[in-house]
Amino acid sequence: MATKTVILLDHREGLLAKTDQTVTIDELSADKSKWTVIMEAAVEYTRILLDVCSALHPVMVIAADQSLTFLNKWQCQEGMCKIVETLARIGPPKVTEETQPDLTTALQQCVDMGLSNSLLDIQKLLLGEEPARHARVICFTSIDNPAHCVDIVNEYLDSNSNEGKTELVVFNLVENKESTELCDPHHVIHNVKPGNLFQRVLDTVIKYHNLTITTITSIPMKEEQSTNTQATAYNVNIVHPVVELPSCPRERLTMKWSSPKNAQNINLKNCVATYPVTPLDVAERPTICLVNFLLVGKQVVLEYPKPNLSVVLINHGGTIVMHYIANSVRSVFDELTPIVDTPGGKVTDYRGEELQLNIKNLELCPHPPPDAVECELPLHRSLLELERFSACFPLTYSTSPLDSCGISRIFGHSL
């Protein structure tokens, strides 16, 4: 089910309080504020949604203080760069002598924004389809009585006949014992310590959007030359949707890095499913090296636990996609058995050169202008050439009458 997500960041003065979490820059460490902790967690939640689920689950991020600051909009396909730039522009919460507004008003406005039309909803309306009306409002804050705030929002939902179409999830930073307070089936309050917020947020996004984590092991990386050590194998965790294929396990998997020689011919393989992926920790050095390796156009083959599938990671225009390749008896990336001379014939007797030449000649060329005659379309011409070429093609020179006459190149000419 398509779900719109509105993320609300509490940007009020109270979030300037320090926590027990630290950040280290150039050997200097400092305590993180509550604003820094919730901002990092919200950015990671948003990044996973945009990288993996943006097609069905659009996301909007809002910061609330005296007014609402929109970090992105439904109708604009703005990515993480826009959101991070806006966060840097608004900066941390500001100390002010004005009375701090209540968070319930901002939550009510976020509920209204969640029910407004996103770009995906507009596209469905233009196609005559019913848009998704289900929304989830996720609030990151640190207040003393979040239950009272949620009760007011619940009354607002009931008064507007929302009929349970909006879920409210509150991540509330606490210094004492953490807990999860369930108000009703559609509204949850997580009282979390700052050090455990990221893991709680990760578990939440995985649960709500049917995601899973896969660990890539044995990634070869060269260490710094000054250490005079050999290459060390590293692990990288990636997040992606649960694989909806028969006999595929739904639990967390571990797949080993593999580098077969013929892994670059993925376009010729039988791909049965594709899933977008995103790294779990973008700041780790092994993750950075793996992503850069993929972004330059290279491919990574993973050893899947079951023999009937192979997995390949490929970059498509900046999006890393996991391809599931169907195998018959063995992996499609295994080395092919070499052809050797047998009593039935010699290797040099096979007409591999002519077959390769004609396949190359049948490759489609760019489409002609719209005013071209129908019979001149590349697809039609290629089909005619293929039908003529494959009507009778002896596999060996010894069985080809034309070759014995010295005119085997006739296949390269149009009749």
Image (cartoon, rainbow, N blue to C red):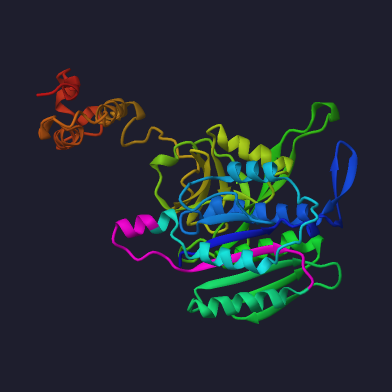
Q: In x, y percent, where is residue 409?
A: 19, 20
| Magenta residue check for 388 | no
Q: In x, y percent, where is residue 143?
A: 77, 68
Residue shown at the point (19%, 33%) measured from the top left: 382
**Which contiguous range is marked in magenta?**
122-144
Residue extending furthest toward the top = 406
Q: In x, y percent, where is residue 197?
A: 75, 62
Would you say residue 251 is visible in this rendering? no
| Magenta residue check for 123 | yes
Q: In x, y percent, where is residue 43?
A: 66, 52
Q: In this view, does 330 lie to the left or right of 253?
A: left
Q: In this view, does 261 lie to the left or right of 378?
A: right
Between residue 382 and residue 372, name the one nearer to us: 372
Q: In this view, does 272 lie to the left or right of 284?
A: left
Q: Which part of the image, by quadrant, shows the N terminus?
A: bottom left
The vertical placement of 271 against 223, above or below, is below
Residue shown at the point (55%, 64%) measured from the top left: 209
Would you say residue 121 is visible in this rendering? yes
Query: How many numbered markers are drawn?
Result: 0
Q: Quadrant location of residue 136?
A: bottom right
The vertical placement of 178 against 280, above or below, is below
Q: In this view, does 127 lie to the left or right of 298?
A: left
Between residue 114 and residue 255, name the one nearer to us: 114
Q: Quadrant location of residue 127?
A: bottom left
Between residue 340 and residue 376, name the one nearer to us: 376
Q: Which part of the image, by quadrant, shows the C terminus?
A: top left
Between residue 335 and residue 316, name the one nearer to us: 316
